Image: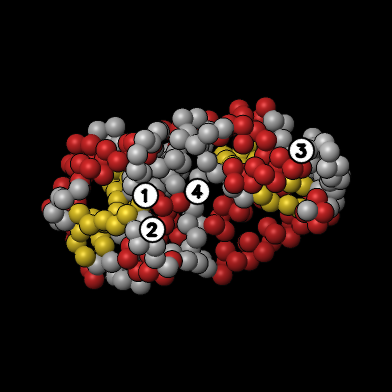
């Protein structure tokens, strides 16, 4: 614990799963001493409003109260983060482009639509009910293949090979709003992605429905059926869409790009409010990270 508290720069990923850590840090009986010149960055990864998981807003607020800067995926998290005294910064999710790499050319993939994900059992709330309703509308449809994730559990190599085998890749709603990591992973796999409409508040600046992926209305199962039917009538005609979607995804939506966006925003706040200055050890660390990210990006362009 001490090495974290005394570090010049700390990044906390997935704040909800780190609740025990932040609760411990906030325990007055523990008497922890934080580096007064340190910079703490948090990443809020889960839905805050209408989450099927308990105390989501409380967990987000707790983590943000320790961080000068918090990147977040759910638009409804912004006022929660701001009220905790942290600077909120919205980012879209991304693909781990080192891991999700397609090896199959589009014509070699099966001309089918594939989905894999969790099918909740028993009483569920929020987006998982939407997911189940949409899935059931497709179950048994010719040309639709699926596997419930963890049934069986596969290695990441097998998961990637599995997704790489289909021309159509379906994305169903989950607990995370907007364009989630699965959307970008599917694009990176080189398939034609079928994605639910995320809403104007999550609009992407480069990736457009009808140009780089197909979309459907998650509130209308018949909309999903229509989109899947359109694709299955002639899957080969969507190759250029899949190719261009993959190109833009790997150009603008990788983990390196997101880190660069975060640290550029952090750099712009150095020397203001609770942020250490640019010449501080934390500020120099931010500059060094940005330089490494730029060098890495230039190698892959």
Q: Which mark is residue 150?
A: 2
Query: Above or below — where is 250 with respect to 107?
Result: above
Q: Mark 2 or 3 closer to N-term?
A: 3
Q: Residues within 10 Å of mark 2 (few under 14, many from 20)?
A: few
- Mark 1 lies on a secondary structure that is loop
Q: CA distance from mark 1 to mark 4?
A: 19 Å
Q: Residues within 10 Å of mark 3 (few under 14, many from 20)?
A: some
Hey, which quadrant is residue 89 in on the image?
A: top right
Q: Mark 1 or 4 closer to N-term?
A: 4
Return the residue found at the far front: 122
In-front residue for pair 159/168: 159
Hey, which quadrant is residue 177 in on the image?
A: top left
Q: Mark 3 or 1 closer to N-term?
A: 3
Q: CA distance from mark 3 to mark 1?
A: 34 Å
Residue 222 x/y as whole percent = 19, 36
In-front residue for pair 245/22: 22
Residue picked out by circle 1: 118
Residue picked out by circle 4: 93
Residue 67 x/y as whole percent = 72, 41
Q: CA distance from mark 2 to mark 1?
A: 8 Å
Q: Are marks 2 and 1 in contact (CB under 8 Å)?
A: yes
In-front residue for pair 94/171: 171
Q: Are marks 4 and 2 in contact (CB under 8 Å)?
A: no
- Mark 4 lies on a secondary structure that is loop
């Amino acid at each position: 614990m001490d090495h974290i508290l005394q570090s010049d720069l700390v990044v906390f990923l997935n704040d909800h799963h780190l609740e025990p850590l932040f609760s411990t840090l906030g325990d007055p009986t523990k008497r922890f001493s934080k580096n007064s010149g340190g910079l703490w960055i948090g990443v809020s990864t889960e839905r805050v409003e209408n989450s099927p998981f308990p105390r989501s807003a409380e967990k987000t607020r707790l983590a943000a109260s320790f961080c000068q800067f918090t990147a977040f995926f759910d638009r409804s998290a912004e006022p929660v983060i701001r009220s905790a005294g942290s600077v909120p910064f919205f980012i879209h999710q991304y693909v781990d482009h080192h891991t999700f790499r397609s090896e199959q050319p589009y014509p070699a993939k099966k001309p089918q639509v594939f989905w894999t994900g969790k099918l909740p059992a028993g009483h569920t709330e929020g987006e998982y009910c939407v997911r189940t309703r949409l899935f059931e509308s497709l179950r048994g449809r010719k040309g639709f293949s699926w596997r419930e994730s963890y049934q069986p559990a596969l290695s990441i190599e097998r998961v990637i090979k599995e997704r790489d085998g289909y021309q159509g890749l379906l994305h169903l709603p989950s607990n995370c709003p907007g364009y989630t990591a699965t959307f970008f992973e599917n694009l990176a796999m080189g398939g034609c992605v079928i994605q639910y409409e995320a809403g104007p508040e999550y609009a992407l600046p480069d990736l457009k429905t009808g140009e780089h992926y197909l979309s459907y209305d998650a509130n209308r199962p018949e909309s999903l059926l229509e989109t899947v039917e359109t694709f299955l009538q002639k899957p080969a005609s969507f190759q250029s869409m899949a190719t261009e979607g993959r190109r833009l995804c790997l150009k603008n939506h990788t983990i390196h790009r997101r880190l660069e966006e975060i640290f550029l925003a952090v750099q712009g706040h150095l020397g203001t409010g609770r942020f250490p200055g640019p010449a501080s050890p934390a500020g120099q660390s931010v500059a060094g990270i940005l330089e490494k990210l730029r060098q890495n990006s230039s190698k892959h362009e």
